[in-house]
Image (cartoon, rainbow, N blue to C red):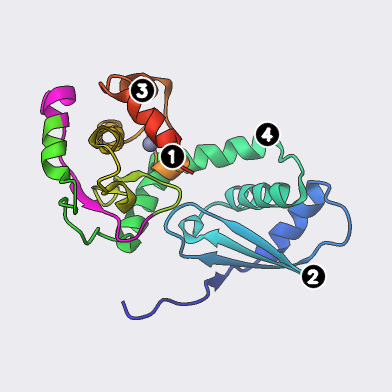
Amino acid sequence: MKHLPAHGAAIPGGAAIFQRLYTRLGCRGRPPRFEVEFYPYANLMHTIRLREETACVRLSDALRGAPLPVLEAAAAMLLSRLYRRRAPREIVTAYRAYTVSPRTRRRIARLRRARGRIVATGPRGGIYDLAPMFTRLNRRYFGGRLHRPRLGWSSRTWRAQLGCFDPALDQIVMNRWLDRACVPRYAVEYVLFHEMLHVKHPLRAARCGIEAHSLKFRLEEKRYANYDRARKFLDRLP
Ligand SMILES: [Zn+2]
């Protein structure tokens, strides 16, 4: 695609929803002017930005067609964050129920597939080759039965993430930062092993950015032989 639209699509009645929730949450003072639009975020992300008298709201367009209470819930959560109010519990619960429903997950997976990027690099980095590493870990910890997704290195160094498994694209991308001689093999292996556990538990574990790791996941992760050493090395990172 040559160019992406700079703006999303205005949501009819969107401003009214925010006005209403502004009052309902008990935010004080004159409400800003709300500009509300659907925006093509890659996942269920929403943002609000206050600029003088105007609040610019972008709701993930994965919510297109969502029932009114879900839009209201997204509004309540954004406003409560911005104005430090507590969002009513029933609203939060309803929103969670919507986001974890299989139908919503499928919808998001479809959007991500359409928008996400297939990693351009192969498994072989300058120092480490992920393919044999995957095979070895698979044999040792998964009885060789784990499905192998596409493997690659990030094209740029990431700041916040060491690796990521994207179930929609069926790929593991590792932070290029790890592909260096000064990074020990056991640390790289540990990150790959962690992502492989996400392959094994695709439903429970959302994307790494969200860090949804169950206790079971954490326990299983400790089976990695160099777990403590690897954690110690990676925890030193700035
Ligand atoms: Zn993770």
Residue shown at 36% from the left, 44% from the top: 162
Disc 4: which residue: 89
Q: CA distance from mark 3 to mark 2?
A: 51 Å
| Left or right of 127, for residue 2 | right
| Left or right of 177, for residue 47 | right
Residue shown at 79% from the left, 65% from the top: 32
Image location of residue 49, percent across then percent down: 67, 63
- Label number found at residue 228: 3
Viewer-nearest of discs 4 and 2: 2
- Pick out the residue farthest to the right: 29
| Left or right of 27, for residue 171 | left
Q: Which range of residues does the magenta coloring cover?
A: 137-157
Q: CA distance from mark 4 to mark 2?
A: 29 Å
Residue 156 belongs to the span the image colors magenta: yes
Asked if the residue under mark 2 is in contact with the one under mark 3, i.e. CB atoms within 8 Å, the reply is no
Disc 1: which residue: 101
The amino acid marked with disc number 1 is: Ser
Q: CA distance from mark 1 to mark 3?
A: 36 Å
Residue shown at 29% from the left, 48% from the top: 174
User: Which of the marked residues, 1 or 3, is nearer the chain's N terminus?
Assistant: 1
